[in-house]
Image (cartoon, helix red, strand yellow):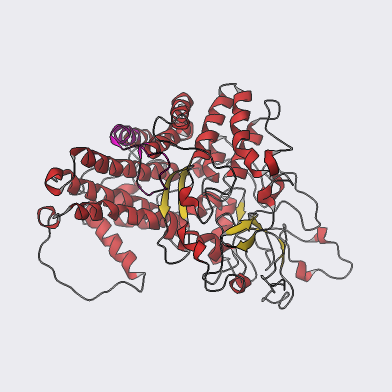
Amino acid sequence: MKSYSIKTQIGILAAAVCLLFSGCALEDEWYSETTPGTFFRTKEDVYKVLNRPFTHLFWYDVGQRPPRRWYLQEMTADQMSMPTRGEDWYDGGHFVRLHSHNWTPDESSISDTWRGTAMGIALTIECRTDLEQLDYPSLGLTEKDKADHVNQLNALIGYFYLRGLDFFGAFPIFTDLTKPAEGRSKAEKVYAHTEGLLKNALENLYPKEGGSEASSVISRGAAATLLARLYFNAESYIGEEHYAECAKLCEEIIGGEYGKYELDENWYGPFSFNNRHSQALIWALPSRNTDQEMFDMFYRYGFHYNKKLVYEGLFQPYNGFGLTPSHAPDGSSYTYKLNGPFSKFNDNDLRKKQYVYQGGGKYVGMLMRDAQLKPDGTPVTCIRAGYSGKPLVLVDYVALMSTLQPGQSPSTLRSSMLDGEEPSLYRLAKFPVAPKEDENCWAAFFPMIRLEEVYYMLAECRMRAGLKKEAADLINEVRSRAFENKADPDPVTKDNLDKYRMVDEWGIEFLGEGRRRTDLIRWGLFLTEEWWDHKASNDPSRLVFPVPTTAIAGNNKLADEPI
């Protein structure tokens, strides 16, 4: 089999990606040779190259449609589901397999995640190589700027490796794009490589300035939080506890040693239309200021079809995923430890309210639930057989209610991933949406890392160290902001804080943020617990995803045991 270098493979993959999008020009276009020595004329040229891998990052975490990596984190766990709705969303059984932990190496979500992660590493290495060769002072920049830029790229490579470690465990390590492709390295080697990249970056990055707006720039605080994430999940990744190292970093981040950050006064600060001003955002990706692409993943794939009539001018939604149900068809509550997320919110929690956009960038609530109304108060209506023309009333259960016969009890209906209907499941509106003509829509940033995560990591480390009162105080400082006057009727205490309450608090605060699988694995619950229409697999092979068939077809060394 012909062997290609990593760089060549990435070029082939990039070309394949290009063919998938109609905006790519396919005509031949010839240029004279461009090298780092001829391209870099001004400092603006430096920033063009520095920003190149961040464009891929935007696609990797925000811009890909459908959101494959989000599917792997959320659709395999207990809080989000994509039930089949009549003819919609069976997708060859993809979501059923994810939900039941029966995925195969041929899943599109797995192959796209492998490819996107490898591409991110290779593109970033290529840019770092170009910048390392430059004479920065000759371009009006300093050697300190150069160290910052190179180590932003080191941190970005570390970020992609951290994702590769989390998704796949064993993953290829490469540092030179001119060398032939290699096989996979063991998770311990990937962990050590990632740690080295982040620790080196940490020493040379600029800290965030107090009061500055959110930015895609990887600051010292962002690198420190990524390193804390690595330590936080080390037991899952390599069987070693590094909670003490994680706690130390979290203390330093909260204490301002890596930049000035602080919590917002309210729960929605990191997500609102003006979230670029939030001092809790440690790392964020800016919008393009042309549409709501940043947050359209929840809107497009989660909202009901006719929400298009409420938020005119935006993309057509597909009535897809929603919150895993908390209730059976007869209205009774499920009793799973990992029950549906709606049941986990206290009734006084402001986030549990119906999402309503009030105009001028203001809104209330975080959930699409119950009767859905247009701004004029008239009902949004259904369009599918069995419900067509009826008012849309979203429900927190899954069953074929349209088949219910007179006198038949709903308790006799099956509730499974194959039994969804048009109104099934509450929907998440964590990232607000508004009519396109509202100018307040265009300024939002996508939170990559926010300070609340640092508080919760430190809280969990304290809990694991036996300091439950300190852990509860940290959680409550974040949690209280979701209640009127911060009056929380059910705060965390040292007496009620166990692993299930800790996992619940992670799920409440970070609902839908693409991390749920990781949190369940860290607590040993991913394989052993049941939730709606999911039986415990108890299969250790399901802790990571397999090398995709498409990747092995391009490099048969990936089929070998990792070294």
Q: Residue 152: which quarter of the image?
A: top left
Q: Residue at x 45, y 26 (%)?
A: 242
| Labels in figure, total | 0
The C terminus sits in image quarter: top left
Highlighted range, magenta:
195-220
Q: Residue at x 13, y 53 (%)?
A: 36
Instruction: Provide residue 238's location: percent of width, then percent of height.
Output: 43, 32
- 89 left or right, relative to 158: right
- 215 left or right, relative to 7: right
Q: Residue at x 11, y 46 (%)?
A: 138
Question: 8 or 498, which is in the foreground?
Answer: 498
Query: Residue farthest to the right?
Result: 407
- 331 left or right, relative to 532: right
Instruction: Provide residue 304's location: percent of width, then percent of height.
Output: 62, 68
Examine the rendering and report whether any part of residue 311 can be seen: yes
The N terminus sits in image quarter: bottom left
Report if residue 214 lies within the magenta region: yes
Report if residue 432 lies within the magenta region: no
The relative height of residue 346 versus residue 191 in the rendered view (above or below) is below
Question: 516 or 459, which is in the foreground?
Answer: 459
Examine the rendering and report whether any part of residue 4 can be seen: no
Q: Residue at x 21, y 55 (%)?
A: 44
Instruction: Provide residue 128's location: percent of width, then percent of height.
Output: 23, 46
Instruction: Provide residue 133's location: percent of width, then percent of height.
Output: 14, 45
